Each structure stands twice: as structure tokens, then as C-alpha cells.
Amino acid sequence: MEEVEIDWKMVVSIWWSMFWRLNCVLFFFGFLLSLLLTVVFARFGYDASNVGSANSIALILITIPAGIWAIRKALEKTHGGCRVVLVKQVPEEQPAQP
């Protein structure tokens, strides 16, 4: 396994991979969740300002797992002929002390 220097092209590739996935997921699930909350709040006669607050909180709550998922998917992909690998560091052995 060869270690490669990180360049801006690779960084932008990883960022773009995360960015578009996260935005697609948030757009789709955010729209569905917002629609569901709006219908439920309208059914029970809540004020429109309450719907906006509930939608904001719900979007924040789905952003966290969606962001984690987007990072995982971006790290699984190949970027510029390379892929990101996490390697466990083995601590160097320390000489015995007398």
C-alpha cells in the first residue's frame, strides 16, 4: 500500500461526494418530513409558526445521521485513483528502563 500526498483535487472530490449526497438526502427526507408535519399540525389546528419550528427541529435531527451516512459513502469511493483507508497506528515499543 502506497501512501499518497493529499492534493486539492482529491480534497474537493471527497467534499463534493459528501456534499451532493447529503443535500439529496436532506432535500428528499426534509420535504417528506415537512409535508407530514404540516399535515399533522393542520389536522390538529396548530398555528403556522409552530409548524415552522417543528420543521426546523426535525431537519436538524435528520441532518446528523444523514451527514454521518454521507461521510461514510464518500470515504468508500475512489477519488482520483485513490481511496481513503484508515490504518490503525501501532505504538512504538519503548526500551526497557532499568
Image (cartoon, rainbow, N blue to C red):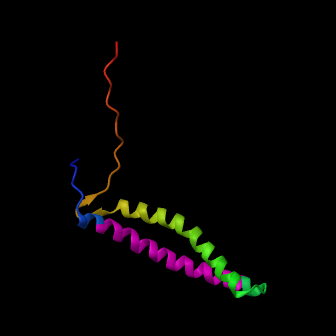
On the image, the x and y values in percent for residue 8 come to 24, 65
Residues drawn in magenta:
12-40
Identified at 49% across, 74% down, the residue is: 25
Q: Is residue 50 left or right of residue 4?
A: right
What count of labels does the image hold? Answer: 0
Specify the quadrant that holds the C terminus.
Answer: top left
Q: Is residue 62 above or below residue 75?
A: below
On the image, the x and y values in percent for residue 40 come to 72, 82
Q: Is residue 42 left or right of residue 29?
A: right
Dividing the picture into quadrants, the one containing residue 36 is bottom right
Dividing the picture into quadrants, the one containing residue 52 is bottom right
Identified at 21% across, 55% down, the residue is: 5
Q: Is residue 34 left or right of residue 47?
A: left
Q: Nearer the viewer, residue 49 or 13?
A: 49
Is 23 a magenta residue?
yes
On the image, the x and y values in percent for residue 51 come to 68, 82
Q: Is residue 30 above or below residue 69?
A: below
Secondary structure mostly seen in magenta is helix
Question: Outermost residue toward the top?
Answer: 98
Dividing the picture into quadrants, the one containing residue 32 is bottom right
On the image, the x and y values in percent for residue 28 come to 52, 79
Identified at 40% across, 63% down, the residue is: 73
Is 34 a magenta residue?
yes
Q: Is residue 68 left or right of residue 94?
A: right
Identified at 70% across, 87% down, the residue is: 48
Q: Is residue 55 above or below residue 76?
A: below
